[in-house]
Every structure is written in structure tokens, then in C-alpha cells.
Image (cartoon, rainbow, N blue to C red):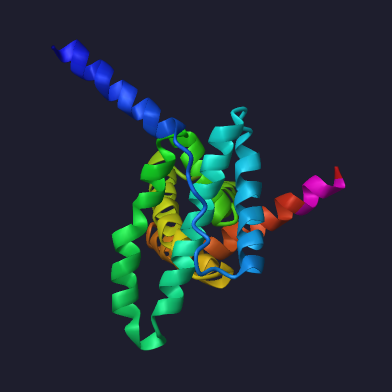
Amino acid sequence: MRKILYAAMLWLLSLTANAQVILNTEGQDPQYVETIKGRAQKIVDGLQLTDAQKAENVRNIIANRYFLLNDIHSKYGKDQQEARDAELYKHHFELASALALYLTDEQIDAVKDGMTYGRLQRDYKAQLEMIPSLTDEEKAQILIWLKEAREYAMDAADSKGKHFWFDKYRGRTNNWLSARGYDLKKERDAWMKRIEEAKKQ
């Protein structure tokens, strides 16, 4: 009986995965739609998916996410931040859930990076290069905070808002490292010196 139920579940999942994801353009400006389609397609191109239907579905999921975020941010004024944040949170996990039908966890992370200008990878790499003596525990904590920043950044209204969250968490990280005894100015100056020396080679 269990085997039958398991097979039925796999069959239903396959049907869902093969279904076409419709691009939800209702009420959207045509020029904005084309801009978002291009932005979403660029992210999908980076995944190098070989299945054309899967690639289109993923593109439409990402584009629909942008449309939803735009609708939410346009709906609320500056004095309605709590209501806006509540609605953003309500929908926050829908993107990863929808993408999970087509992508691996690593690919979903790549989509998140694409939607946040790759800041997580760049900031993490820079942190490791600036302070080579970081312990494994410290590296893990920095990465945890960067992933948290990325989740907030994904729901931001624009590029300024997305960068804000990474800058905010970089400040938190720097304060934490300073409290652990790191001289960040000294570390940064030494890093810049290493970069200049590498350029001369």
C-alpha cells in the first residue's frame, strides 16, 4: 500500500512539475513586463538549464515574484510599513517553494544571488580575503548573517533597498568581529596592501 501511495505522490509531483507556469502580467505596464522578463531571463541563463520548458517556468516564477513585490511595495505608503512587512512575510517563502519543483537547493541559492546582485558571495569572499585568520566558527557565523541579509534583500523594493540590507549586516558583522578582538582598520589596510602587491606581480 505504501509503495502505491509513494508512486501516486511521485506521479502527482511530475504532473505539477510539467505544468506550464503562466506569466502573471495582469495590470502590469507592458514596458515593465519586458524589463522584468529580461531580468529574470538573465538569472535563468546563469543556471544553464537544458530543458526549455523548465527554463521558461523558472523564468516566469522569478518574473511573477518581481511583479508581486512591485504590487506590494506600490500598495503601501511610507506610514504603512508594518502592514507592508506583514504582507511581504506572508509571501516570502512562496518563491523557494515554487522553484523547488524545478531546481536543486544550490540552484535556488543561485536564483536568490541573482536577485540580490551576488552580494552574498562577493561580501563573503571579501571578508575571508580581508581577514585570513578567521576561524571556521567565525566564517560560519558571517555566512549565516549574509544569508539572513539576502532573505531580507530579496523582498526589497529596489537595488538601494537590497544593498541596504547587506550593508546593515556588514555593520553587525564588523561590530561582532571588533568585539572579538579584531582590529578591522589594520586588517583592511593589510588587505589593500596585499591587493596592490598582487597587481605588481
Asked whether residue 159 is in view, the answer is yes
Residue positioned most to the right: 200
Above/below status of 159 relative to 140: below
Query: Which residue is drawn at the image coordinates 29% and 77% (left, top)?
Result: 82
Q: Quadrant of the N terminus?
A: top left
Residue 199 in the magenta stretch? The answer is: yes
Question: How far across and down, in percent of the image, does residue 69 sit?
Answer: 45, 65
- Number of numbered callouts drawn: 0
Question: How far across and down, in percent of the image, does residue 132 sit?
Answer: 56, 44
Residue 96 in the magenta stretch? The answer is: no
Q: Quadrant of the C terminus?
A: top right
Question: How far across and down, in percent of the image, does residue 154 sit?
Answer: 46, 59
Asked whether residue 131 is in view, the answer is no
Query: Which residue is drawn at the image coordinates 56% and 46% (left, top)?
Result: 59
Residue positioned most to the bottom: 79
What is the span of residues highlighted in magenta in the rendered image?
A: 196-200
Main SS of residues in magenta: helix
Side of 86 relative to 22 (left or right): left
Above/below status of 5 relative to 87: above
Side of 161 relative to 151 (left or right): right
194, 167: nearer the viewer: 167
Residue positioned most to the front: 26
Query: Which residue is drawn at the image coordinates 41% and 71% (left, top)?
Result: 72
Question: How far across and down, in percent of the image, does residue 106 sit?
Answer: 48, 35
Above/below status of 141 relative to 163: above
Residue positioned most to the left: 1
Above/below status of 67 relative to 147: below
